[in-house]
Every structure is written in structure tokens, then in C-alpha cells.
Image (cartoon, grey):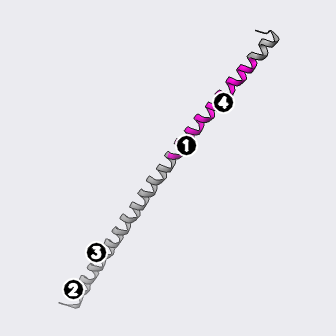
Amino acid sequence: MSLSNTALIVTLILTVGSNLVWLLNYYGNSEKKRYAAEREFQHLKKNQEQLMLNLDNIFQDVESQYKFIARDLLVIKTKLGIE
């Protein structure tokens, strides 16, 4: 084997090895990004559910306050003789 053939083989091995390392690194980074995106989506979904629950509670509170006000207004109208 000549020196040029040995250099060619070493270069080829280093090229394939570096490409393999790059590919593994690329795959690892893409998996991290996929996991981060999925996690972020789950957080957003949970926050949306909590917002909807809180909004429902607020509407229930407003409705109960409305009922109290309507009842008090009816009592006032009755006492004043207003229809």
C-alpha cells in the first residue's frame, strides 16, 4: 500500500466518521426540539383548560350576583308599588 492510498483511506474514514457524528448530533437535537415542542403544547393546552374553567367560574359568579340583584330589585319594586 502506498502512502497516497493510506492517506485516502484515512481521509475517507474520517469523513464517514465525522458525518456519522453530525448525523447523531442532528438526530439528538431534533428529538430535543420535538420533546420541547410537545411539552410546550401540553402546557398551552393545560393553561387553556384552566382559563376556560376560571372563565366558567366567573360567569357563574356573575349569574349568581345577577340573581341577587334581580331579587333585591323585585323587593324594592314591590315595596314602592312599581311594576
The structure residue drawn at horizontal position 49% and vertical position 45%, both measured from the top left corner, is 45
Disc 4 or 3, which lies upstream in sequence? 3
In space, the residues marked 4 and 3 are separated at their CA atoms by: 68 Å
The structure residue drawn at horizontal position 23% and vertical position 87%, both measured from the top left corner, is 6
- Amino acid type of the residue tagged 1 in the rendering: Gln
In space, the residues marked 2 and 3 are separated at their CA atoms by: 16 Å
How many neighbours does mark 3 have within 10 angstroms: few (below 14), some (14-19), or many (20 or more)? few
The structure residue drawn at horizontal position 23% and vertical position 82%, both measured from the top left corner, is 9
75 on left or right of 14: right
Disc 1 or 3, which lies upstream in sequence? 3
Coordinates of residue 20 in the picture (x, y in percent): 31, 71
Disc 2 or 4, which lies upstream in sequence? 2
Residue in the foreground of this view, choosing between 36 and 6:
36
Region of the chain picked out in magenta, as a range: 46-73
Q: State the mark number for residue 62.
A: 4
Badge 4 element? helix
14 on left or right of 72: left
Badge 1 element? helix
In space, the residues marked 2 and 1 are separated at their CA atoms by: 67 Å
Kindly identify which residue carries mark 2.
5
Dominant SS of magenta comes to: helix
Quadrant in the picture for the C terminus: top right
Coordinates of residue 5 in the picture (x, y in percent): 21, 86
Q: State the mark number for residue 16.
A: 3
Kindly identify which residue carries mark 1.
50
The answer to whether the residue labelled 1 contacts the one labelled 3, judged by CB atoms less than 8 Å apart, is no
Residue in the foreground of this view, choosing between 28 and 18:
28
Coordinates of residue 24 in the picture (x, y in percent): 34, 68
Which mark's residue is nearer the viewer, 4 or 3? 4
Disc 2 or 1, which lies upstream in sequence? 2
